[in-house]
Image: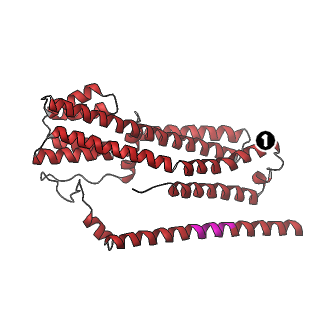
């Protein structure tokens, strides 16, 4: 190893270490600032610690440790991983199970990895497999966003139909049956399930609560809570449906405004992430000899891996910056 090559390696590692240190310091400072801001907000709200927060929060669905409200032994808590995948399947609207979808994803990624690797791709095989996973994640998030928007619009229409049916003299079950017949999926089958459980002898409040818990939608949980309270205390259900529809419309309007305010940050994130990827691919096509060091030398592989890790962390940080809490 020559003296100049040794000096170049030392300088490269020094620059890389300096950049990594600055990046880590920025992340630590951001975490400390976030913790201080959270503590200050809790202090202004008069919340001392996490225990006080839990005591002050109104819990609409209480998890009983030993017994539920009917005196039956409560079921054991479900696995968090299994519950997460069940929630993901419900939000994305997958027809197959989450395990089947993930198995297909990993099978496709593994097949592409093997093909590219045996064709001499080397480290490019990891990039292709990672690109498949990233594209699937982007498609899943897009599907969840579209389904959530459609769900909210259909819920507003369903509440309007139910309110008019109640004013026309139909019972609550009849109004839900009308909604199930008039509204397309995903909203129609939910009310059809409520009517089916009601016909089997289940209590209306329990049926609505179960559907709301398995759908993982905030608006539907709000609807279930309001209907349960109204059925216990009595009142005009038609006016309740109209009020809920107005609240959901206001939430949808606020969500659209939030998306407009964060659109510039999202666009900046996509551009900043896409630029180095496109440039890297173009350099591989135009001048493969210039990019050969990233595949043939250990320091080049380390730099390439560190670049991918830093881009991933930067994407996470920019995603957090574009979140508005309201």
Q: Quadrant of the C terminus?
A: bottom left
On the rendered structure, is 139 left or right of 123?
Answer: left
In the image, residue 146 above or below residue 16: above
Q: Label 1's element?
A: helix
Q: Quadrant of the N terminus?
A: bottom right
For the residue pair 119 and 127, the one nearer the viewer reads as: 127
Where residue 223 sits in the image (x, y, percent)? 25, 44
Main structural element of the magenta stretch: helix, strand or loop? helix
On the rendered structure, is 174 left or right of 271?
Answer: left
Residue, disc 1:
285
For the residue pair 238 and 186, the one nearer the viewer reads as: 238
Instruction: Quadrant for residue 39, please give it.
Output: bottom left
Q: Residues within 10 Å of mark 1 (few under 14, many from 20)?
A: few
For the residue pair 217 and 202, the one nearer the viewer reads as: 217
Q: Residue at x 73, y 47 (%)?
A: 279
Res 86 seen here: no
Res 218 seen here: yes
Instruction: Quadrant for residue 315, please give it.
Output: bottom right
Q: Residue at x 40, y 39 (%)?
A: 149
Q: Residue at x 75, y 60 (%)?
A: 299
Instruction: Quadrant for residue 91, please give it.
Output: top left
Q: Which stretch did the figure color magenta?
A: 19-26
Total residue callouts:
1
In the image, residue 322 above or below residue 210: below
Q: Residue at x 36, y 70 (%)?
A: 42
Where residue 249 sits in the image (x, y, percent)? 33, 42
Instruction: Check if residue 201 falls in the magenta segment.
Output: no
């Amino acid at each position: 190893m020559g003296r100049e090559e040794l000096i170049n390696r030392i300088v490269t590692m020094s620059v890389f270490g300096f950049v990594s240190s600055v990046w880590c310091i920025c992340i630590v400072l951001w975490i400390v600032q976030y913790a201080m801001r959270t503590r200050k907000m809790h202090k202004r709200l008069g919340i001392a610690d996490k225990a006080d927060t839990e005591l002050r929060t109104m819990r609409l669905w209480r998890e009983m440790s030993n017994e539920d409200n009917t005196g039956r032994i409560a079921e054991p808590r479900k696995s968090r991983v299994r519950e997460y995948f069940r929630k993901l399947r419900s939000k994305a609207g997958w027809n197959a199970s989450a395990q089947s979808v993930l198995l297909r994803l990993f099978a496709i990624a593994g097949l592409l990895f093997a093909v590219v690797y045996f064709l001499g791709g080397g480290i490019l095989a990891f990039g292709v497999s990672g690109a498949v996973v990233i594209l699937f994640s982007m498609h899943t998030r897009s599907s969840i966003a579209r389904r959530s928007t459609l769900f909210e619009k259909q819920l507003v229409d369903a509440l309007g139909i139910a309110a008019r049916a109640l004013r026309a003299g139909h019972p609550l079950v009849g109004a839900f049956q009308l909604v199930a017949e008039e509204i397309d999926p995903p909203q129609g089958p939910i009310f059809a399930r409520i009517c089916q459980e009601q016909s089997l002898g289940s209590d209306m409040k329990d049926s609505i609560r179960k559907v709301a818990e398995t759908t993982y939608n905030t608006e539907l949980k709000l609807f279930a809570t309001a209907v349960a309270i109204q059925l216990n205390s009595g009142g005009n259900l038609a006016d309740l449906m109209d009020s809920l529809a107005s609240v959901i419309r206001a939430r949808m309007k606020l969500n659209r405004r939030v998306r407009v305010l964060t659109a510039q940050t999202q666009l900046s994130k996509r551009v900043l992430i896409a630029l180095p990827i496109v440039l890297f691919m173009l350099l591989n096509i135009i001048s493969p000899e210039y990019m050969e060091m990233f595949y043939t030398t250990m320091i080049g592989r380390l730099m390439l891996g560190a670049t991918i890790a830093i881009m991933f962390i930067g994407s996470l940080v920019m995603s957090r910056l574009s979140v508005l809490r309201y």
